[in-house]
Amino acid sequence: MNPSILSEDSFQAYAKEHKLQPFRVKQVFYEIYKNQNIEFSEMTTLSKELRQDLDEKFCVIPFSVTNVLEDENTTKIWLQTTDGHLIEVVILYHWDTHELHEGNKGAKENKGWKDFLSNHSDLSSLSNPNENKLNRITLCISSQVGCPMNCLFCVTGKLGLKRNLTVEEIIWQVLYANNYIKNKFGKKDDGTLYGVRNVVFMWMGEPLLNYDNMKKAIELMLPQERLSLSRRHITISTAGIIPGIRKLIEDNIPVKLAISLHAPNQELRNQLMPIAKKYPLDELMKTIDDYVQATDNRIFYEYIMIKWVTDKPELAKELAKLLRWRLAHVNLIAYNMNPAIDLEESSKTQMYKFKEILENEWITVTVRASMGREGKGACGQLGYEKVNEKS
C-alpha cells in the first residue's frame, strides 16, 4: 500500500522533487482537512495530472473498513490497520431537542425526560427521533489497539493491549469520520459541510498511556488550517493515570478531562478497576485538585450504574461527600451488556434515586443516554463481537 500523504516528510520530499508551489501543498491539505475528501479523485481543485500522480504514489488513509453498523443515533465503524489489527470508532448524532412535539407527550412529560433535556452536555445528550435537525456530531476515537486496563465492566479490556496507535492513526479516524459524515448528510443550510464537532478520547484504549501520540494528535486537531476543533470540544477520558494527568498540567493542554471514577471509595474501586491499586483514590483526587487549580476546568466524573454493586444509596452519599466543594459534573452511565461477566444494569428508578441523592447534596449530575447500545457501540462495549466469540 502507498504511504499516507499525511506523513508530511514524504509529501514534502515529493513536493520539493516535483517543484510544487507552497500554495499547491496547502491546496492538497485543504482538500483533505476542509473539503473532507479522502480520495484524490474527489479533489477537483487540483489538476487532473496532479491527482493521478498523487494517487499513484500516496493514499490519504491506509485503513481498510471491515464493517459499518448504523442506527438512528450512531454509526459504529471497524477499521483495520496496515498490520492487520482492528480498531473501532463510533459517531454519535445529537439531534435538536429544543422543542417537544405534541405527539411526544406521555413518557416525555416525566421528570426523567426533562432531566435529560435540561442537563445535557457535550458528553451527554438525548436525541429526539421526531426532530429531524442535526445539532452536533461527536466522534469517540481509539488511542490504542485493545486496552490494558481490564476493568471489570468493560469488554474492551478483555482484549488486552496490542499496541499504541500512532499520531497518524489517531488523526485518520477523524478524517475518515468527516468524509463519512459528508457523504451521509451533505451540507448544512448555510452551505458548510457537516462534520465532527466533538472528539472524545474514550473508546479503545487508555489515552494517557499513549500520551505523546495523543498530545501530537490534539495539536493537529486545533489549528485553523487543519481540523480547526475547539479546545473545549475535545475531551480526554482516563481511568486515572496520575502521571498522565500531571503531564497535562505541565504541558498546559487546555482540553476537557473526564475521569472514569465508577466508585467513591478505594475498596470498591479496587474491585472494579485494577489500575486503582496502582493509583489510589486519595492520590488521584489530590492530582485532580491540582489539575483544576491549574486549568480552572470542570471535571466530568463517569460513574457506571451496576445493579446491587455501584447503585446503592449509601454509595451516592459517599460520592457526594467525595465531590463536595469540587468543580465536578457527574455522568451516571447505565452498565452495558458484557459477554465476559454476569452483571446487570441498574433500573431507571434506582438511577434517578441515585441522581436525586447527589442533587440534594448540590452535585451537578446527568443520567447519560446510552447511545449505540444496540450496535454494541456504547460505553464499555467496543470489541464485544470478538470477546463474544471466545466466551
Image (cartoon, rainbow, N blue to C red):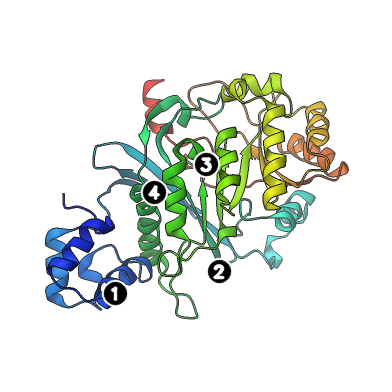
The foreground one among 197 and 101 is 197
Q: Is residue 209 above or below residue 35?
A: above
Q: Quadrant of residue 332?
A: top right
| Label 4 vs 3, first from the N-terminus | 4
| Label 1 vs 2, first from the N-terminus | 1
* Residue depth check, mark 4 versus mark 2: number of the one nearer the observer: 4
* Residue depth check, mark 3 versus mark 1: number of the one nearer the observer: 1
Q: Is residue 85 above or below residue 271?
A: below
Q: Which residue in the protein does label 4 denote?
A: 170
Q: Quadrant of residue 136?
A: bottom right
Q: Which residue in the protein does label 3 denote?
A: 378
The foreground one among 241 and 201 is 241
Q: Residue furthest front?
A: 250
Picture disc at residue 27: 1
Picture disc at residue 36: none
Q: Position of residue 73 (x, y in %)?
A: 51, 54
Q: Position of residue 54 (x, y in %)?
A: 16, 65
Q: Which residue in the protein does label 2 denote?
A: 133
Q: Position of residue 369 (x, y in %)?
A: 62, 47
Q: Residues within 10 Å of mark 2 (few under 14, many from 20)?
A: few
